[in-house]
Amino acid sequence: MEKTKTSAVLRTRRLSSKMLRFLVDAEDETLREFAQASKTGRAAKTLVKQGPLRVTLVALKKGTALPPHHVAGPVSIQILRGCLDLTTDNGAVDLPTGSLASLQAGLIHAAKARDDSAILITFAMP
């Protein structure tokens, strides 16, 4: 029986020691290529999955929209590259490179990439 390889993009890392480290730029470069080739214009990789904690890196092509959605717990969104238009029921805000937004649990939000973008999302599952 032949072993199947899991794509590096699809692999999730569970904390197996007291600390994990990532070369985020290298991860972003790989995801950027997948996003450019994707029909949806996006690619994502969960970097950490430990108990309720999730840390996910997302690459978005310019113009890619994320439909309205919510997360059961609080969520933070850090813009590593590009610019994101984030919309909630309170209105829209621009999140340029270097921005960090924190959303309360259950807040419905949508987003659209104004540029090719990379975002780091951290949240806790209930």
Image (tube, rainbow, N blue to C red):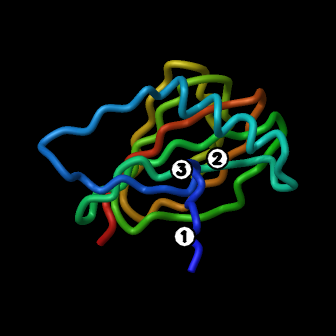
Q: Is residue 30 left or right of residue 54?
A: right
Q: Residue furthest left?
A: 18
Q: How many residues crowd mark 1 within 10 Å: few (<14), some (14–19), many (20+)?
A: few
Distance CA(mark 3)–CA(mark 2): 23 Å
Q: How many residues crowd mark 2 within 10 Å: few (<14), some (14–19), many (20+)?
A: some
Q: Residue furthest front?
A: 1
Q: Which residue is mark 1?
A: 3
* x then y, percent, for residue 57: 52, 42
N-terminal label among 3 and 2 = 3
Give the camera-side residue of 72 and 107: 72
Q: Is residue 80 left or right of residue 61?
A: left
Choose top left, top right, bottom left or bottom right for residue 40: bottom right
Q: Image height check: is 53 above or below 30?
A: below
Task: Identify which residue is drawn at 82% across, 39% down.
Answer: 36
* x then y, percent, for residue 51: 23, 65
Task: Identify which residue is drawn at 80% across, 45% down.
Answer: 64
Task: Identify which residue is drawn at 64% across, 47% down.
Answer: 87
Secondary-structure class at tag 3: strand
Q: Work out which quarter of the rendered image holds the C terminus and state it.
A: bottom left
Q: Image height check: is 48 above or below 63?
A: below
Q: Which residue is mark 3?
A: 45
Residue kind at label 1, given as amino acid type: Lys
Q: Image height check: is 110 above or below 79?
A: below
Foreground mark, 3 or 2, reads 3
Q: Is residue 86 left or right of residue 106?
A: right
Q: Which mark is residue 87?
A: 2
Secondary-structure class at tag 1: loop
Give the camera-side residue of 24 and 81: 24
Q: Image height check: is 115 above or below 33?
A: above
